[in-house]
Amino acid sequence: MTRNTIALDDRLATYLMQIGVNEHPVQTALREFTAGHRMAKMQISPEQGQFLGWLVQLLGARRYLEIGVFTGYSALSVALAMGEHGHTVACDLSPEFTDIAREYWRAAGVEQRIDLHLQPAMLTLQALLDDGQADSFDLAFIDADKTCYPHYYEACLKLVRRGGVIAVDNIFLGGRVIEPQPQDPPSVSAMHAFNASLRHDPRVAMSVLPIGDGMTLLTRR
């Protein structure tokens, strides 16, 4: 027994992969390719991908909204879990990163089920609302520029149905978020304030998971 979540050293992280992650071959190929990318730290962990897929099954999710795609591992994980009747709306700014994503989505046979928007995410989110798609998504995942998290969150609260889930990534920022320092980038103090704002938000039920760089789950009431 332990009163606190234990830290994962390399041996335990390897064991976690062995017993807790079942990847599609294309997921494995994408993860291994991205590990050599200059921005590899932006990819979610494989156990996070496994968790998102499990969450899809739990919710019976068929509509998924993703803010921040990078090379596409999270969108791929969810699209595979949702199956042929699932639909993803994905938001990103980078053709460089998402061209990689498209290649692997295509290899896994899910590209046609992912609607990728290459523009500022708030433009896409507002367009979805203007198109009458409020309350229509089962799951949203926020994993993009941290200073905009409050804006993404408020939009997701309108787009995700009651009982649906909003997942927020990188809430720990490697531990810097505990006590932001003057020399830190604006993202650190922004995340510190955002995390604090969620604890007593009456619109959601919240749980924080020490997975990856920290993930907050919020169920819309």
Image (tube, grey):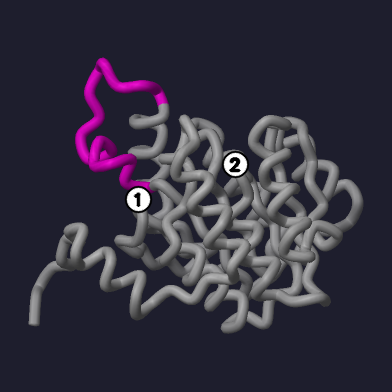
Image-based side of 10 in relation to 75, left or right: left
Q: Is residue 159 above or below residue 221?
A: above
Nearer to us in this view, 219 or 108: 108
Q: Is residue 3 above or below residue 142?
A: below
Which tag, 1 or 2, sits closer to the chain's start?
2
Q: Secondary structure at mark 2?
A: loop
Asked if residue 94 is among those painted magenta in the image, a careful observer would answer no
Q: Is residue 17 above or below residue 105?
A: below
Quadrant housing the N terminus = bottom left
* Residue 60 coordinates in the image, percent (x, y): 67, 82
Amino acid at dot 2 = Phe
Nearer to us in this view, 80 or 11: 11
To which residue does mark 2 refer? 70
Image-based side of 195 in relation to 205, left or right: left
Dot 1 crowding, Cα within 10 Å, few <14, some 14–19, many 20+:
some
Amino acid at dot 1 = Asp
Task: Inspect this view and state whether residue 146 appears.
Answer: no
Q: Secondary structure at mark 1?
A: loop
Q: Which residues are magenta?
A: 171-186
Nearer to us in this view, 178 or 66: 66
Q: Residue furthest right?
A: 131
